[in-house]
Image (tube, rainbow, N blue to C red):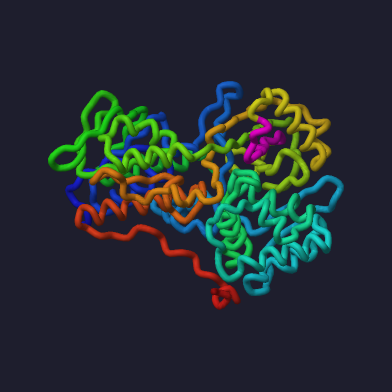
Amino acid sequence: MTGAGQTITVVGGGLAGIAAACALADAGSRVQLLERRPYLGGRASSYEHPGTSEVIDNCQHVLIGRCTSLIDLYRRLGVLGAIRWYDRFTFLAPGVRPTILETGRLPAPFHAAPAFLRAPAFSLRDKLAIGRGLSHFLRALPPDTEEDFAHWLQRHRQTQGAIERFWRPVLVSALNEDLERISVHYAAKVFRESFLLSGESGRMGIPSIPLSELYNRAIGYLEARGGQVCLRTSVESLRPTPTGWRAVAGGRALESDAVVLALPFEAMAALLPALPHNAGAEELGAHLAEFEHSPITGIHLWLDREATDLDHAVLLDTTIQWMFNKSRLQPGRRGSEASYLELVVSASRSLVTMSRQQIIDLALRELALFFPGVASAKLIKAAVVKEVRATYSIRPGLDRLRPRAASPWPGIFLAGDWTASGWPSTMEGAARTGYLAAEAVSRALGHARSFLAPELPAAGLMRWIRS
């Protein structure tokens, strides 16, 4: 069997590390997965909030049908059934009838066109501008240049309504960054794959169980294949041996034939002094110094009554961008008269300095614009989670700094959503880099193996609309 008898240490129990570890374990390697936290999932995790005694996600995470490697990982872990899929999206604007975007019977890329043409949130000028803008992404993605997407929108004569009610809410939520700081290449990728390639490509999946429950399934999965998961374990040093690498972690030495470092970019930078110094390491350190974070704020509200019968909605013209109705999304919470809502503000720099109470008051005021019953509801409890290091900022030209799986040290391989994957900072990007690192390990140890899941094919007319 591929990799049989070889020991691989994977450092980092986020999605990239889980994907790499599971792929290598399936290939027959003995995997040691090390994670400094007491749970797996990294930034896609949940925990018992001390102020509410509720298990909450650090932030709502979603995927789309195009996330084939992530879906493959869920299939491995046996949790694909815990994902609820939607192909109908509700956009709400104060004082305007709801806009419903959904897949119709026309072939891609026109599958959502009838719903879009009926959308009351957009004026006729907005719709013409949006259609003209999307047409630029039909044949191929533009290259990653120094141009930001705000400038691209201006250059392509987009209306203010189109920007504020379509381009901005979709992109800020998908890429967790402001338009002025987003790469045109990755902005185009979001719209091409979510709106144009096929109806299946853009459908949205939402986990119906807490995130840590979802990803902790990897512990049993790895142990059943002879692996070991060490939580609350940080790596203190890595040194080469005649046959591989020795990691000192949690006060003990772990020997392995190869190592996968599946860490966030800031953790990778912090680990560099514990690795052998060379010119490649120096260059990697310089590149890491150019990455920046972008924050997300999650607002959790428990109300004494039902606020809405919607499972989720995009909220327009407000600070709050998304509403997720956890009372409906999580089966264990159904049947209660109370409501549990999670609200999301991506690229939330304006909220970082605000107090918890200021954010809660803001959220309740804005929610009442869409759901009037909120104004008379009693707030039972609330939690505010500021993830100031939620994602890296997908700035124009950043791809030139993103390394591939091979590292400056023979036998060590890199993974993490910040490494080269062809995707921005997403769960799919992380899963892909985990599989890519596993492939690189496999090649280095003489057992070439492919782990990346096949891409979802284009549908309808998009099969022939190519450059």
The quadrant of the rendering that contains the C terminus is bottom right
Residue at the farthest right position: 95
The quadrant of the rendering that contains the N terminus is bottom left
Is 419 magenta? The answer is no
Is 347 magenta? The answer is yes
Q: Is residue 113 left or right of residue 20?
A: right
The answer to whether residue 208 is visible is no
Please state which of residues 309 and 457 is positioned toward the viewer in this rendering: 457
Which residue is drawn at the image coordinates 43% and 48% (left, top)?
A: 402
Q: Where's residue 275, x and y in %?
A: 28, 34
Please state which of residues 41 and 286 is positioned toward the viewer in this rendering: 286
The answer to whether residue 417 is visible is yes
The answer to which image quadrant residue 272 occupies is top left
Q: Magenta stretch?
A: 337-351
Which residue is drawn at the image coordinates 48% and 40% (left, top)?
A: 290
Q: Where's residue 102, x and y in %?
A: 69, 62
Q: Is residue 432 left or right of residue 374?
A: left
